[in-house]
Image (cartoon, rainbow, N blue to C red):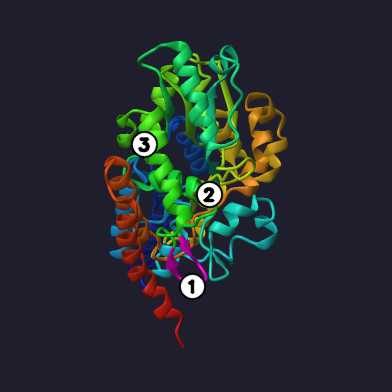
Amino acid sequence: MSIAKIFQSCIALILGTYGAVAQAQNTELRFVTWRSEAPEVWNQGIAEFERQNPGVKVVSEIGPQSSTQLHDLLVQKLKNRDTRLDVFVMDVIWPAEFASAGWALPLDGYFTAAEREKFLKAPISANQYRRQMFGVPLFIDAGLLYYRKDLLEKHKVSPPRTWPELVEAAKAVRAGEQDPQLVGFSAQFKQYEGLVCNMMEYILSNGGALWDETRMVSALGRPAAIAAVRFVRDRIIGEISHRGVLAYEEPESLALFTEGQAIFHRNWPYAWAVANDREKSKIAGKVGMTPLPGFDPGTGVAALGGWQIGLSRYSTKPDLAWRFAAFMTGKEMQKRIALATGRAPTRLALYDDPQIKKKIPQLQSLLATFKQAVPRPTTPVYVPLSNIMQRYFSAVLALPDTDIDARAALAARDMNRVLDLLRDRQAP
């Protein structure tokens, strides 16, 4: 071989090696998430992951704050088999849908049984579909009742154990305060997924159900569910709230409470930190928290909420995507998120962490609530079922003269049509 050809071969080898190195040093990992209340914590975590993985650049795509809108964005990307999408956050109700559609990557080869034992059982269960894992729990939510501790003490009213007691307590405090701006109760009654969580808590605490998971038929038309919905319409909204709550999601309902304009408030655990932040809340230091009431003492039900991290089946970098998901749901990141936002971790060991116990002492008392929180039924057709329930609940709560029985029958009919799809799948 001539000297010229040897020289050319060496140059080609050098350029090829340089190109491969350059490509390795510019690996892009795309992460779709929502806008956190503490973005600096997420940004710091991502920067740390990039330092630990030289040549990797995590590109965060911030989706809508609304769970419903974020779901639609992810579905569009996954339906289109977008190979640029690698990692995404999931609401607790999405894993079964994403798994059934073939969009989420099964994680059993990465997320070992031994590692799963380090997490709370409820969110682990919510991430399973047909005995496979499709998400890693990031933080857990469960419905809680917040109240104005100062006002209840002032008027010698005990924290309510039942929903009827809550109504009477709110009326007694309002009568004593004589403040036309003060409402009895603030919660999430807008037509969106949060409405289903709220109404599920009333229905299940009255002995009802959203649907019968054995027979695969709607339970909205049964007496227990009808009575619970009527109670919310006639006594909660009709007597102690104002009609503005029909347009409230979490931020609006919490703002009413932190402005000192509501006696009772239903929300997730993060609301404690906000309500007691003297820069954000007019009632800091005056807040109490207790499990949600039931229709009888001891029958309260808290809806399970929370978020997970999942991997796209169409990612061309699944091993790297898993490393990122494992890092973001790891012990250190969950601790940072908890300390910055009050979000409850899903890793059991963090409930004994000294820093968390000092800054968020209420989390220890909430552990029993998290262990008993009730998930919405796991099904790949949850979204259409939720849409039907949202329309039904919204219509009957907003219109005082609506025939609840008739509306419930129509909603049940539509739900049964969706549930028929599951029966057809299960047929031999």
Residue at screen point 60% across, 27% down: 159
| Front position in the image: 346 or 151 | 151
Residue position marked by numbered label 3 in the rendering = 249
- When the figure is inspected, residue 108 is found, relative to residue 73, above or below; the finding is below
Q: Is residue 35 at all visible to an observer of this figure?
A: no
Q: Is there CB contact under 8 Å for labels 2 and 3?
A: no
Q: Is residue 87 magenta?
A: no
| Front position in the image: 43 or 14 | 43
**Residue 24: which numbered mark, if any?**
none
- Specify the segment rendered in magenta: 211-218
Give SS at disc 3: loop
Q: N-terminal of the two: label 2 or label 3?
A: 2
Give SS at disc 2: loop
How far is mark 2 from mark 1, CA to CA?
20 Å
Q: Is residue 217 magenta?
A: yes
User: Quarter of the image holding residue 410?
Assistant: bottom left
Task: Name the amino acid, label 1.
Answer: Arg
Foreground mark, 2 or 3?
2
| Front position in the image: 406 or 123 | 406
Q: N-terminal of the two: label 2 or label 1?
A: 2
For mark 1, does the 10 Å Cα neighbourhood hold few (<14), some (14 to 19), or many (20 or more) residues?
Answer: few
Residue position marked by numbered label 2 in the rendering = 206
Q: Position of residue 100 (x, y in %)?
A: 43, 69
Task: Name the amino acid, label 3.
Answer: Glu
Q: Position of residue 314 (x, y in %)?
A: 38, 65
Residue position marked by numbered label 1 in the rendering = 215
Task: Name the amino acid, label 2.
Answer: Asn
